[in-house]
Amino acid sequence: MSRVVVVGSGAREHALAWGLAKSAEVVVTPGNDGMAAHGLTCTPRPATELEADLFVIGPELPLVDGLADQLRAQGKLVLGPNADGARLEGSKAFMKDFLADADVPTADYEVFSDEAAAHRFLAESMTPPYVIKTDGLAAGKGVLVTNSLAEARLDVSAKVSGDAFASAGSTIVIEEGLDGEECSLIVLCDGRSLFALSAAQDFKRVGDGGTGPNTGGMGAYAPMPIDPDLVDGIMETMLRPTLKELQRREIDYRGVLYAGVMLTSAGPQLLEYNVRFGDPETEVLVPLYGDQLFALLQASARGTLGEVAVSASGAAVTVVMAAHGYPDTPRRGDRIAGLGDDGQLAHAIDGVVVFHAGSARVDGHFVTNGGRVLAVTAHADDLATARSKAYEAVGRISFDGCVVRSDIALDAVKGIA
Ligand code: AMP
Ligand code: GLY
């Protein structure tokens, strides 16, 4: 049996490890207590000290820091771009300039490191909504979208001065505000070919109806019911030109290109690229591909993506259960009821799997140990069933102050019904 190392410790990596374990032996570094309770092998040893047939790197930070380069230098097979490709996520200014070179539709923008110049541009050239982004990585929290010029000005000052995001924010991108439905198109790339997974939708705001602050994602579902022609259009106008531009720059990109797309009335616009799987989108995509995940990821690392034939089945919904105080100051240590010793209680529902992120096992029971604690996921033949099963499982799990949205995938289910 092939052996895979998954790098990371969140619910995304739990989902990847769970899916890969259907056809490979999996080791996760560092992993988390929930994965271990699920029977997955976790180790604190760094990936560079491990042996495997395939390495799958979950989070953006190790990619930006060159972990894929290090592993490839050791002769390992890796899913995840080298640091040159990871700049697409590591620097928004780099990404926007890259998109301009590749002629990919995206919001108009300017890059600033000078506070006064940024303020002038805001006042003289932009209209609401104002969109201000940190250039560097900010754990999904570096983007402000506001109708208030005063708030936008404060944000510019806080970012450029380094007060808000240290050096990640000292360069900013100010861009045109876009309006529409958002779609996550997660595409595997092997340097020559592309393979789009089912379109997914993520729920970024903390509150029902898309209210409150942005989070890492409060839930997701897939497939998103969008016109296949629209997906083809996104591939043609965004992903293929991106691959061509990567090739032109001699970047051998083998990993995930996650396109965050705004479906505007004037057509799709690219909000951003991430260079890794989405979280929580991965939690709903992995179940759709069953035991085909390993073959798919291996082919994309090897450069043989053009030869694989895999297909998605059914629909999946994931509902994130976050800790009291999330996203600002999540509380740790709240005891989680409903998981049983090994997740059995919520798992007892057919098609349900509970992926762990910010949880820890203390004296034999789970407690909260981070912002997003669990991603409660259900896979079924159709979206409505998946949704009701996911919420049934959420209803069986509880902890003090739990933050949950009640409307994940609701509009999509209503639209279908
Ligand atoms: P990003 O990290 O660039 O995907 O931005 C995070 C979130 O901010 C996106 O998912 C959107 O909801 C919002 N956003 C980003 N860019 C824009 C924009 N140009 N117009 C409106 N909303 C945006
Ligand atoms: N779902 C948002 C992200 O992974 O960045």
Image: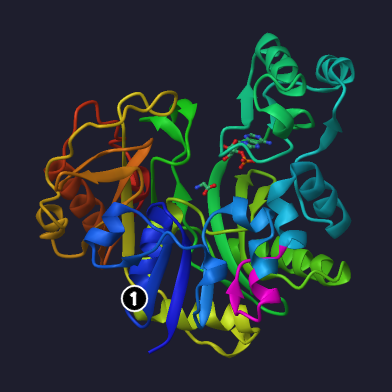
The image shows residue 304, relative to residue 124, as above or below, that is below
What residue do we see at 12% from left, 58% from top?
A: 344
Q: Is residue 410 left or right of residue 339?
A: right
Side (left or right) of 106 relative to 307: right
Boundaries of the magenta span? 71-82
- Expressed as whole percent of the image width and height from the top left, the position of residue 77 reads 60, 80
Task: State which image quarter holds ligand 1.
Answer: top right
Please give the name of the residue rendered at 90% of the width and 19% of the height, measured from the top-left corner.
117
In the rendered image, residue 395, in percent from the top left (x then y), is placed at 14, 42
Is residue 286 found inside the magenta-colored segment of the image? no
Total residue callouts: 1
**Mark 1 residue type:** Ala
Q: Is residue 301 above or below residue 199?
A: below
Q: Quadrant of residue 116?
A: top right
Q: Secondary structure at mark 1?
A: loop
Provide the residue designation for mark 1. 21
The residue lying toward the viewer, choosing from 96 and 414, is 96
On the image, the x and y values in percent for residue 358 come to 35, 43
Label 1 Cα neighbours within 10 Å, binned few <14 / some 14-19 / many ≥20: some
Question: How does the figure colour the protein chain or chains?
Answer: rainbow
Observer able to see residue 103: yes
Decide if residue 284 is in sight here. Answer: no
| Quarter of the image where one finds residue 168 | top right
Quadrant that contains the N terminus? bottom left
- Residue 257 coordinates in the image, percent (x, y): 63, 62
